[in-house]
Image (cartoon, helix red, strand yellow):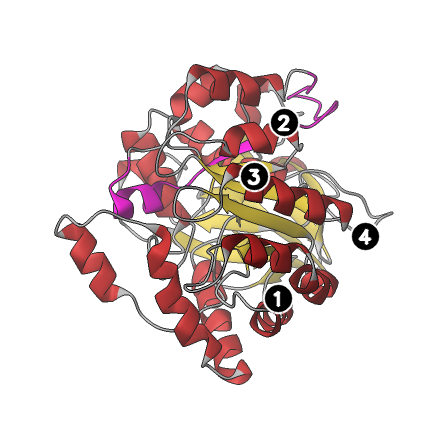
Amino acid sequence: MSLVITNIGELMTQDPRAGADEGVLRDAAVVIEGERISWLGPAASAPAADLSFDAEGRALLPGWVDSHTHLIFAGDRTAEFEARMAGKSYSAGGIAVTTGATRSTPDFDLTRLAMGRVAEAVAQGTTYLETKTGYGLDVENEARSARIASTVVDEVTYLGAHLVPAGTDPDEYTGLVCGPMLDAVRPYVRWADVFCERGAFTEEQSRRVLQACRAAGLGLRVHGNQLGPGAGVRLAVEFGAASVDHVNYLDDDDVAALAGSWSDWDGQGGQGRRGTVATALPACDLSTRQPLAPARLLLDAGVQLALASNCNPGTSYTSSMAFCVTTAVLQMGLSVHEAVRAATYGGALALGRESGSDTDGSRAVGSIAVGHRADLHLLNAPSATHLAYRPGIPLTAAVWRAGVRQA
């Protein structure tokens, strides 16, 4: 079954090969065949299809790619949020509250809660989702979280190295993360992450985790430089991690290291050695009252940037990628095009899903191009500029995920 979406006022492809006019087409059309995009171009030249959808002059974007979330949890941390808004500083310790609630919640209920959060995100235009373990923090519950996550999202990341449980020796727990826990989650995950931060894992402990997970064949990610200067960025680049996330506190060497990791990358053709994406999490920055990540500085230095929601119960309880885009434009110095790119193509880069083919069964997401997965987000507005021009207004008109209408 094929579908042509026609009368698109602004088609923001985010295809790096498009080049001219930042990949934006006017008065355009897109044809979907199954779960893939089979054609795009001027509306007047659109081929016939089995079904037709009139976009009525509205803007069509790639679906949001949310490359950093923590959706497998139970419980509530409203009191912690209220205290922080009253002036108490954020520390990683609040994770333990969620760990207790998550461990005591049955599989069915934990799955139902996660599915509800995914549905909420999809209804707002998110079509590709990563999520992490990290609220189990023992072998049984980390494996359970990974298994549940693998049934509800597109990409699963192992984050046993989220926090050292109270009363546990840090080095012994790091050994558990690198050994039995890693073995237990391995069938369900593609990525591994470590929270390299004060109050969480030291540089040496983080290095052990990254080494073990790399040896197990997992792609790497790092939580780094969130609460102050640290080793997170340096470790991420050293280990060739796909992304380093938070990046609030960076010095010149950190920025240079991230930029250098992309020195062989052809941004237009998408060819060459991929570097480490810097993922900014602006909703979290606002909630924890940390300085916003220096997105403008990173882009100007040649670093590839992603935006993600960091949806979690303690520091960023939102799945609104539109809110992140709006914040990036209004407070972080990005243009609308740059912010949308970071929330779509940038997220795909951070997950290694910016390219793919029918041959390997892994279609690209985060951009609109022939052969890519048909993940599309129609706005109830004539251009993407309205995301920042009308902040806080729900603008999602329709969503297609792998070619299937969701909302």
Task: Indicate left or right for 215 with 175 as reference.
Answer: right
- Select label 1 or label 4 by which is in front: 1
N-term mark: 3 or 1: 1
Where is residue 169 drawn, in percent x and y?
50, 58
At label 3, which amino acid type do we have? Glu
Residue ranking furthest to the right: 359
Q: Within the magenta stretch, is there residue 111?
A: no
Q: Say whether marks 4 and 3 touch (CB < 8 Å).
A: no
Which element type, helix, strand or loop, lies under badge 4? loop
Q: Which residue occupies the extreme left position in the image?
A: 86
Q: Tell us which disc is closer to us: 1 or 2.
A: 1
Q: Which residue is mark 3?
A: 204
Please give the label number shown on residue 146. 1
Give the Cα separation between the discs numbered 2 and 3.
38 Å
* Residue 287 position within the rendered picture, expressed as x and y whole percent measured from the top left: 27, 48
Residue 62: x percent and y percent? 55, 44
The residue that disc 2 covers is 16
Image x and y of residue 366, in percent: 59, 42
Horizontal side of residue 287 vs 345, given as left or right: left
Residue at position x 42%, y 34% in the image: 225
Picture quadrant of residue 235: top right
Magenta range is: 264-290
Look at the picture and state if 204 lies above or below 160. Answer: above
Task: Tell which circle, 4 or 3, labels the residue nearer the N-terminal end.
Answer: 3
Rendered image: mark on residue 361: 4
Disc with the residue nearer the chain's start (2 vs 4): 2
Mark whose residue sits in front, 4 or 3 = 3
